[in-house]
Image: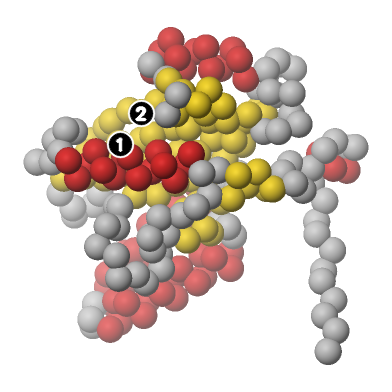
Amino acid sequence: MSETASAPQSSLRELLGGTKEPEFELKLLPGWERHSPGEADRAAMDAALKKRFMSINRPELHASMRTQLDQAYALMKQQQVKAYFAATAETDSLAIIPGAIVATMFHAGSGGTLDTHVAAIIRDHGAKPLFGDKRFIRYERESTKTAQGDEPVVVTTIVYMTPVPGSKRRRGLQLTATIARPLDMTATDEKFLAWKLALDVCVSTLRWVPA
């Protein structure tokens, strides 16, 4: 039986004669999966949450989580998120990291290059090359947040950026990782440091795939 693949939709850049952006791959952590933040993925995530909460007879929790889920996907659409990575698969591993990675595209303004932006985050945030590899720049910041009805947590945001091949350093792939930890877990806790190292290693495996 033959299969007919549907033609891919052209981006505005392609229609205007530009080069299609290359795809990228990461070697993911145990239990982590790649997702495209579209309606089909949102529906699948909602169904999984519903099944989980119904199994413990807590439908009200599903209603609360569904609201948060809808808000998260609306925000990702607004921010033009290309993909996100999270621990959504079943796994026997005990080393599950309470976080996620979101991929977006950064565009240098006014026909410039990424160099001005990189210089700014080095100056303002102390950004440094990832594992000494100057193709990646990395910095992190922290904030304390409280979700409705939950205890406050410390949220660490790690931002990585690397130039998109063929863009003449006008576009960069930005990977933003977030990790939440309880207030009583310090920034020097061995487990927390291991989480950050695992995310660093994951990002360092990035491989570009020709369009």
Looking at numbered disc 2 in the image, what kind of residue is underneath it?
A: Glu
On the rendered structure, is 128 left or right of 18? left
Q: Position of residue 54 (x, y in %)?
A: 30, 82
Which residue of the protein is positioned furthest toward the front in this rendering?
Answer: 132
Q: Position of residue 8 (x, y in %)?
A: 80, 59
Q: Position of residue 20 (x, y in %)?
A: 79, 42
Residue drawn at point x = 37 percent, y = 72 percent = 90
Residue at mark 2: 140
Instruction: Determine whether 74 is above or below 31 in the image.
Output: above
First in sequence: mark 2 vs mark 1? 2
**In what quadrant of the picture does the N terminus appear?**
bottom right
Instruction: Determine whether 163 is above or below 21 in the image.
Output: above
Crowdedness near tag 2: few (<14), some (14–19) or many (≥20) residues, C-alpha within 10 Å: some
Residue drawn at point x = 85 percent, y = 84 percent = 2
Q: Are marks 2 and 1 in contact (CB under 8 Å)?
A: yes
On the rendered structure, is 24 left or right of 84? right
Residue at mark 1: 156
Q: Position of residue 3 (x, y in %)?
A: 82, 80
